[in-house]
Image (tube, rainbow, N blue to C red):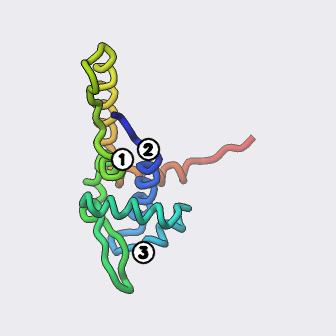
Amino acid sequence: MIAVTDKSRVAVDALTELAQRGDAPVPILEVAEARGIALHVLEQLFASLRRAGILQSQRGVKGGYSFRERTTQVTLYQVVEAVDGRLDHRYEDAPTAGDSVWQEACERLRALLSDVTIADMVEREARALDAPMFHI
């Protein structure tokens, strides 16, 4: 089944914020407040991302979350897998003619998400914020 939910979008948004703050651990509340994400939602997402090896946590006064690897190595596909599960099209019954289309769609989505990293998202967000706004 192909399933990319809002959880993935929120997770990528939160990881983009975390990446913008540098290498030091960042308290989860700061990320939640900066992006307008409910704390309990972000706690669940970050727990999944930590279990997947994307994030690491540090306790204490200077604690928080940070990336286990460089943001240039963390792909959106890894994030989607961590919070939504694998992107697969599985045959539930005998394969049909349409199954090949769904398989191809899944492969294309997987390829796209594998080509974009969290570092790319930081760059895209910076470009979007620098884009001139024209109002009529």
Residue 18 vs 97, above or below: the answer is below
Q: Where is residue 87 in the image (x, y as percent from the top left)?
A: 30, 38
The residue shown at (31%, 31%) is 106
Given contact means CB atoms under 8 Å apart, are the residues at marks 1 and 2 in contact? yes
Given contact means CB atoms under 8 Å apart, are the residues at marks 3 and 2 in contact? no
Q: Residue 5 carries which label?
A: 2
Residue 4 vs 40, above or below: the answer is above
Q: Name the residue under label 3.
A: 27
**Of all residues shown, which one is farthest toward the top?**
97
The residue shown at (34%, 74%) is 24
Question: Label 1: few (<14), some or many (≥20) within 10 Å?
Answer: some
Q: Is mark 3 on a helix, strand or loop?
A: loop
The amino acid at mark 1 is: Asp
For the residues marked 3 and 1, what is the alpha-carbon distance in whole angstroms?
Answer: 24 Å
The amino acid at mark 2 is: Thr
- Asked which quadrant contains residue 74, the reply is bottom left
Judge whether residue 49 can be spotted in this image.
Answer: yes
Question: Label 2: few (<14), some or many (≥20) within 10 Å?
Answer: few
Q: What element carries label 1?
A: helix
Q: Where is residue 3 in the image (x, y as percent from the top left)?
A: 38, 39
Question: Label 3: few (<14), some or many (≥20) within 10 Å?
Answer: some
Given contact means CB atoms under 8 Å apart, are the residues at marks 3 and 1 in contact? no
Q: Name the residue under label 1.
A: 84
